[in-house]
Structure formats: structure tokens, C-alpha cells
Image (spheres, helix red, strand yellow):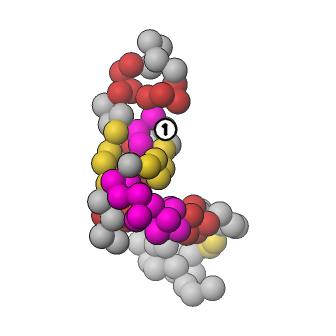
Amino acid sequence: MKLAYTHENIALVTNIQQLLEQAGIETVLKNEFSGSGRGELGVFDTWPEVWVVSDQEFPRAEQIVESVSEAAQGPDWVCGHCGESNGPAFAVCWHCQSAREAR
């Protein structure tokens, strides 16, 4: 088993886990409930983690995590429907739910 992704935000971690599971990669979520241990444990030791069960699937999992991370980079975009500014990771406008136009 190998660590594929960790972050302080459980929503981001579970999103990565779901993407990997949808790709047919078996995962295990660790430290899901360890946030209450902060103070007794190091902060980073309590972050939720996604582990890939099969070492053979790990390179493919790395590619998926990397592609998601790259999508979150770049400039903000402005919704063509309502004019709201959205972060680069959003494919849908957070304000009006209109799909992002093709780049």
C-alpha cells in the first residue's frame, strides 16, 4: 500500500478517493477521524490520507492526482453567464451553476 494523497481538508481528500475509485483503483482512507487528536499528535500526522492498495496501480493513481492538481492551477475565470469570478478548479460557476466555457 502506498500513500497517494493527503491534505488537511477532508472534502478534498474524499474527492480524490472517489476519483481513484471511479477509475477502478482500490483505496483506503486513513485518519478520517483523527482531527480530534491535534495537540496530542503533530498537525500533519492527523491529516486524512488516501492510500492505494495495489502497488501496481499506484503510478496510475499518481497520474490522476497530478491531473486534478494541475486543473486547480492557473488563473481565475469569469462566468460568461453571470460575470462572477471563479477559481481555476471550478468547472461550473459557483454562483449560477453555468458550465465553464471551453478554453
Q: Is residue 6 above or below residue 83?
A: above
Residue at horizontal 41 percent and vertical 43 percent from the top? 49
Residue at horizontal 41 percent and vertical 39 percent from the top? 48
Residue 96 image-quadrant placement:
bottom left
Q: What residue range appears in magenta?
A: 47-65
Secondary element type, mark 1: loop
Q: Residue 12 location in percent, x, y? A: 44, 51
Whether residue 89 is visible:
no
Does the magenta run of residues contain 98?
A: no
Q: Amino acid at mark 1?
A: Glu
Residue 69 image-quadrant placement:
bottom right
Q: Residue 41 location in percent, x, y? A: 46, 17
The one nearer the camera, 86 or 70, is 70
The one nearer the camera, 72 or 68, is 68
Q: Is residue 14 above or below residue 59?
A: above
Residue lying at the far front in this picture: please name it.
56
Mark 1 surroundings within 10 Å by alpha-carbon count, few (fewer than 14), some (14 through 19), many (20 or more): some
Quadrant, the C terminus: bottom right
Q: Which residue is mark 1?
A: 8
